[in-house]
Amino acid sequence: MSAAAAQRYRQVGVETASPGLVLLALYDGAIRFGREAAQATRRGEVARKGERIARVMAIVGELQSTLDHDKAPDLCAKLDRLYEYAQDRLELANRTLDAGAVEEVVRLLETLREGWQGAVAQTRGALR
């Protein structure tokens, strides 16, 4: 399969995925980029670290911007604070080369993903 065909296949998959699966994919990407940022930080690969942290921050920013405070105000307020905390820690990690701060964000995102995975599974089970 050509690179263009593979890209199109992935794009169709994202466009037809449920919102819950898209949410999990965003968490997966942020977690992967966070792990890569921590590794790059430990190796002293400053440019790669910065690029990976920027990707995590972009995903966390997207998660934060799509919160629907009208539907679930309490949950959204809590998630908003967690995402803001994650952004602050990532900024610190980027400035100070602190791999531990990135790893802290990765653990936070893993915990959130686990919770969302359970919610998505429940929703999918209810639809059957």
Image (spheres, helix red, strand yellow):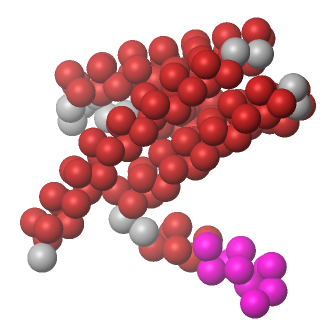
Q: Nearer the viewer, residue 62 or 49?
A: 49
Where does the image place residue 56, in percent across and percent down from the top left?
Answer: 63, 35
Quadrant position of the N terminus in the picture: bottom right
Chief SS of the magenta region? helix
**Where is 58 relative to 121, above or below?**
above
* Position of residue 125 in the picture relative to residue 28 (left or right): left
Q: Which residues are magenta?
A: 1-10
Residue at 27% across, 42% down: 115
Q: Residue furthest front?
A: 43
**Where is 118 relative to 85, above or below?**
below
Question: Does the rendering let one see residue 54?
Answer: no
Question: Does the segment drawn in magenta span residue 19?
Answer: no
Q: Quadrant of residue 124?
A: bottom left
Q: Nearer the viewer, residue 122 or 4?
A: 122
Residue at 30% across, 19% down: 77
Q: Quadrant of residue 103?
A: top right
**Where is 125 relative to 128, above or below?**
above
Question: Does the segment drawn in magenta span residue 3?
Answer: yes
